[in-house]
């Protein structure tokens, strides 16, 4: 993997104004990303999704992003106009969401949605776009691409829907993919099959991937590097292969509290949280 | 405690359970594992009377179940659902949620029963007059368990009780369920898609695929990984995390 960074994030903060006062969802996250697969892991409310959304400028209207640096190559993501964003989103950075049921347009055929994604960023005629879309559906291992091309999202299964999402997000050939719990809604075997497709495509096309998930084991078996988040802070950064060498009590606690298939049915260790973790 | 034989069920023309046999001794814990659409939840829903079109024999506490369930049945058998966000009434306080079953069954003494049920699931009295939206996911699932326990049942049907929770909260709820089974002598049938959860909680396990039990195993056999059916082996491998080579060996079971 090349070392020259694609994305630089320094001291990223995301704050929401709510009727009950300010909520600090992300409190000073820093990392840089090369052409690699980075995992961001944490429990609900840890700020992992908000970190991903902030990079793509998708923070909700009542949220505020501040950062010392938020750069994609030399593009300053913190200060883009909507017009400039359209050149980045989808074309250079794109996002795979958790649930294909809610992320695909229900009244548009799958083929038309993929073609729309492609033609938004590439000037090609309809025939060429259709050809590319079918190729892409084949690339995500859909056996009958013509049929799926003409189907509506409700006519395909969850695993198939997620493959369609991947096809749609990869067809403009972005350099960075942010996948926010892309497989959490799927059965385990389907989940791994979808991850294998993502793995192959990201590797073949030399893309960078940020994989956001709550599943520490899954992420570490898939990514090169893992950031563990707790209450808006990165509490530990690990090489994925060195998961068992985790030092932070939160990471260790997360690993220990999982039930294991070792025949031991005694009580699981409980994660005891300490107030100091939240201070980073 | 529970004997099910030759259970078949249909949703319209769709045959969703095919000759399911299950036997759970008193104070036992039985696990049903499978992927979506395998019929695992339908087994629980049939026992509890939420499925109309079924055939076969279901014996609970040596009593054969017919097409309807009486009040006595629900004092014996209670169910805990997957989603603690959907299964509690959003505009009822925890107190009212817990009092309702007591009143329906005319048990009386609801005040002390509510206090006791909350204590059993590890919630203090400050939760009693709150609404579900003021509670975290784990606390809500504790309330759902308390609502099941308040009728002092002998059998709990657990439908993915922890799959909507974070792993640290899952550990707490699983420990709670183990303790309750020990202390109150409960019998469990637990449904989960997570092999590790079922291996941790259950003595006997059945693996389901397309409405059929394809393999049975004890917790010990599961720990050793000595599964025979190719579908169960695939599930077992999938539980081990992402491995490119393993994924290539997967077959579709549609």
Image: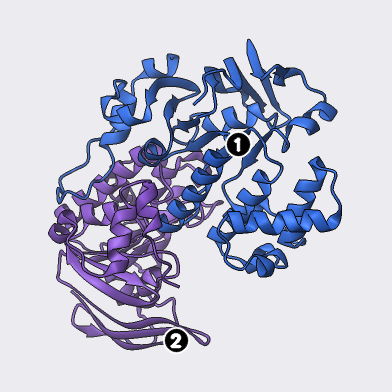
Question: Mark 1 or mark 2, which is nearer to you?
Answer: 1
Q: Which mark is residue A177?
A: 1
The purple one among the chains is B
Determine the secondary structure under disc 1. Answer: strand
Residue B191: x and y in percent read: 33, 63
Badge 2 sits on which subunit? B
In this orientation, does residue A132 appear? yes
Q: Which residue is mark 2?
A: B53
Q: Residues within 10 Å of mark 2 (few under 14, many from 20)?
A: few
Q: Are discs 1 and 2 less than 8 Å apart at CB?
A: no
Residue beneath the point at 64% across and 13% down: A69
Q: Which mark is residue B48?
A: none
**Left or right side of B208 for B1:** left
Determine the secondary structure under disc 2. Answer: loop
The hue of chain A in the figure is blue
Residue A58: x and y in percent read: 69, 33
Determine the CA span between mark 1 and mark 2.
Answer: 47 Å
Residue A195: x and y in percent read: 48, 48
Residue beneath the point at 66% across and 37% down: A94
Residue beneath the point at 73% across and 67% down: A150
Badge 1 sits on which subunit? A
């Amino acid at each position: 993997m090349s070392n020259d960074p694609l994305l630089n994030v320094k001291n990223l903060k995301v704050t929401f104004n709510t009727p009950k006062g300010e909520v600090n969802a992300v409190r000073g996250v820093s990392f840089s990303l090369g052409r690699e697969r980075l995992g961001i892991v944490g429990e609900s409310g840890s700020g992992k999704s908000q970190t991903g959304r902030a990079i793509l400028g998708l923070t909700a209207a009542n949220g505020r992003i501040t950062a010392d640096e938020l750069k994609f190559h030399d593009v300053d993501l913190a200060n883009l106009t909507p017009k400039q964003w359209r050149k980045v989103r989808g074309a250079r950075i794109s996002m795979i969401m958790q649930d294909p049921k809610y992320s695909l347009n229900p009244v548009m055929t799958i083929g038309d949605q993929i073609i729309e994604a492609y033609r938004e960023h590439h000037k090609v005629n309809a025939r060429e776009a259709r050809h590319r879309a079918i190729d892409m559906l084949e690339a995500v291992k859909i056996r009958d691409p013509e049929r799926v091309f003409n189907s509506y999202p409700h006519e395909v299964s969850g695993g198939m829907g997620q493959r369609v999402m991947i096809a749609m997000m990869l067809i403009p050939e972005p350099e960075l993919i942010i996948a926010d719990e892309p497989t959490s809604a799927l059965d385990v075997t389907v989940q791994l099959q979808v991850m294998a497709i993502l793995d192959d495509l990201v590797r073949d096309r030399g893309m960078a991937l940020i994989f956001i998930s709550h599943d520490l084991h899954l992420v570490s078996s898939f990514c090169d590097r893992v950031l563990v988040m707790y209450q808006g802070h990165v509490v530990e950064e690990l090489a994925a292969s060195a998961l068992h060498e985790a030092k932070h009590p939160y990471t260790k606690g997360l690993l220990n509290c999982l039930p294991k298939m070792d025949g031991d049915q005694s009580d699981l260790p409980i994660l005891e949280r300490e107030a100091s973790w939240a201070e980073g | 405690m529970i004997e099910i034989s030759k259970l078949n069920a249909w949703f319209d023309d769709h045959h969703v359970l095919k000759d399911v046999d299950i036997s759970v001794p008193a104070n036992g814990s039985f696990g049903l594992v499978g992927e979506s659409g395998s019929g695992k939840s339908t087994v629980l829903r049939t026992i509890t009377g939420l499925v109309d079109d079924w055939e076969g024999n279901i014996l609970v506490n040596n009593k054969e179940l017919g097409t309807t369930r009486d009040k006595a049945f629900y004092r014996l058998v209670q169910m805990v659902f997957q989603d603690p966000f959907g299964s509690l009434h959003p505009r009822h306080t925890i107190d009212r949620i817990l009092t309702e079953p007591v009143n329906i069954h005319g048990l009386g003494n609801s005040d002390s029963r509510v206090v006791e049920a909350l204590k059993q699931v590890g919630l203090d009295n400050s939760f009693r007059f709150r609404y579900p939206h003021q509670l975290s996911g784990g606390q809500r699932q504790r309330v759902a368990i308390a609502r099941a326990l308040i009728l002092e049942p002998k059998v709990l049907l657990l439908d993915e009780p922890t799959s909507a929770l974070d792993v640290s909260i899952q550990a707490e709820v699983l420990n709670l369920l183990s303790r309750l089974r020990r202390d109150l002598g409960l019998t469990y049938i637990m449904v989960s898609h997570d092999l590790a959860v079922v291996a941790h909680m259950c003595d006997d396990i059945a693996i389901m695929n397309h409405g059929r039990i394809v393999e049975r195993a004890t917790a010990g056999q599961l720990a050793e990984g000595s599964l025979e059916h190719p579908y169960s082996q695939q599930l077992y491998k999938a539980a081990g995390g992402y491995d490119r080579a393993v994924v290539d060996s997967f077959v579709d079971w549609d």
